Image (cartoon, rainbow, N blue to C red):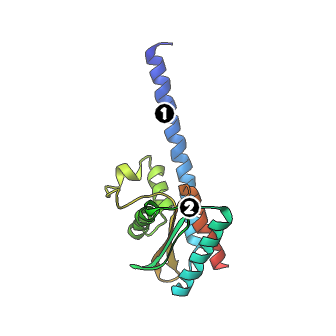
Amino acid sequence: MTAEAERSGAERTEAERAEAERVHAERAVAELTEQERRLVLDSFGNDDAWRLGALLMELARERGAAVTVDIRRGAQQLFHCALPGTSADNDAWTDRKRRVVERYAESSYLVGARFRAKGRTFEDSSRLDLDRYAAHGGAFPIRLRGTGVIGTVAVSGLSQAEDHALVVEALERHLG
């Protein structure tokens, strides 16, 4: 095989990989959008934040997961807990993911998937300070029916898919 044929095959493989990632991201966008459509609350106060945060801590402990949880309504932090095995880095991750939710009014995982579905990355295309914003899974909007986004719930400590799934599971249980 010539060097040109090898390079052409490698380029084709890279293009195929990129296309597969884009298609996977498009499917993820549909699934994540549906989650956000379903997970809408009628109200959310300080006691709700406490219950949701305690539920997240319970789920994490059951799984032996070292996570940090942060829940906010607007600028006010209503709940924050860091399990053993976490560090200040997890606080920084929850902050970076939370800022994405505040800016885009969508989960941080959905924002990242939207960029990937367009064949781009958040890091290369958002033009935002990556020390302050991270479109990685784990932060979700607290959305009130008839009002819109009023806060965030964020988790850090697992893979981005697992952080996101933990938040979704807790919100589903919270909604009953």
Q: Nearer the viewer, mark 2 or mark 1?
A: 2
Image position, residue 99 (x, y; %): 39, 67
The tag earlier along the polypeptide, 2 or 1, is 1
Residue drawn at 46 percent across, 77 percent down? 72
| Position above or below: 53 against 42 | above
Count every numbered label the image shows and give the total.
Answer: 2
Image position, residue 149 (x, y; %): 46, 76
Side of 59 relative to 78 (left or right): right
Residue drawn at 56 percent across, 48 percent down? 24
- Give, as a three-letter code, the residue at label 2: Asp
Q: CA distance from mark 2 to mark 1?
A: 29 Å
**Residue 42 shows in the view:** no
Q: Disc 1 marks which residue? A: 14
Residue drawn at 66 percent across, 75 percent down? 173
| Position above or below: 25 against 51 | above
Image position, residue 58 (x, y; %): 64, 72
- Give, as a three-letter code, the residue at label 1: Glu
**Residue 131 shows in the view:** yes
Q: Secondary structure at mark 1?
A: helix
Classify residue 95 by image quadrant. bottom left
Residue drawn at 49 percent across, 29 percent down? 12
Side of 26 relative to 75 (left or right): right
Q: Disc 2 marks which residue? A: 163
